[in-house]
Image (cartoon, grey):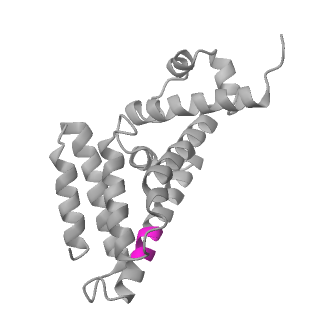
Amino acid sequence: MPRRSAEQVAEGRQAILSAATIEASVYGFRAASIGRLAERVGMSKSGLVRHFGDKEGLQLAALQAGIGLFVADVWRPVAEAQPGLARLLALCDAWLEHHRRRTFPGGCLLTTATVEFDAQPGPVRDAAANALARWLKALEREAEIALADGQLPAGTDPADLAFALNAFAAQASVALHLFGDEEALARARRLMRRALGR
C-alpha cells in the first residue's frame, strides 16, 4: 500500500479534529466516542488514535483546535481595533456572534472543558485552566488600558470586569443551547455594555 503524503496526513488530522470538537461540545470530552468519531471521518479506531497517541492526546488536541477556532472567530477580527474600550466592545460583539453562529453545536468548548475537568487533575484540566486564564488576562489588559484612558468609570476593577464579561458570555451560550433562548445573546450584549459603562 502506498504511503500517505504529509499533506494527506495533515488533512486527515484536521478532519479528525473538526469532528472531535463537535463530539466534545455535544457529548463532553470524556463521553465523546472514538468509535463514533472514527465512523464520522471514515477511518478505523486504531487509525484515528494513532494520530494522537491515546484518548487523552485526542482530548488535548481537540481542546487546542477549539481554542484555535475561538481565537480565529473572536480575537483575530478585532485584533487591529483601538486597544481599550473600542476593542473590548468589538470583542464582546464578536464573542456573542461566535455563539450565535453555533460554531460548536453543543456550546462553548472551553466552558465544556472547564466544567468537565475543573476537579479532575491532569493535562486536559491544566490546558483548559491555562487557556481560560490567558483569555481573562487578555480581557483584563484591555480593561486596564480603557481605565487608564478614562474610558471606564473610576474605580472599575479590570479583573472584576473580565470576570463579568466572561460570565455573561458563558451564560449566553448555556441559555442559547439549553433553552434555545436567542434573546440571551441580546441580554448578554446589554449587560456587557452596562458593565463597560455604555
Left or right for 196, reference 187: right
* Magenta stretch encompasses residue 48: no
Q: What stretch is highlighted in magenta?
A: 137-142
Quarter assignment of residue 168: bottom left
Quarter assignment of residue 2: top right
- Quadrant location of the C terminus in the rendered image: bottom left
Q: Residue at x 22, y 68 (%)?
A: 193
Kindly give the residue lying farthest to the top in the view shown.
1
| Residue 25 screen position, x and y as percent | 41, 36
| Residue 187 screen position, x and y as percent | 17, 56
Q: Which residue is drawn at 39% across and 77% down?
A: 84
Kindly give the residue lying farthest to the right in the view shown.
2
Vertical side of 115 occupied by 48: above or below? above
Depth check: give the residue in front, 187 or 30: 187
Left or right for 117, reference 195: right
Left or right for 84, reference 188: right
Vertical side of 52 occupied by 81: above or below? below
- Quadrant location of the N terminus in the rendered image: top right
**Residue 119 seen in the current view:** no
Q: Which residue is drawn at 26% across and 74% down?
A: 196
Q: Which residue is drawn at 48% across and 67% down?
A: 80
Vertical side of 101 occupied by 46: above or below? above
**Residue 32 seen in the current view:** yes
Quarter assignment of residue 35: top right
Q: Mostly what secondary structure, the magenta segment?
A: helix
Depth check: give the residue in front, 46 or 106: 106
| Residue 85 screen position, x and y as percent | 34, 75
Count the marks: 0
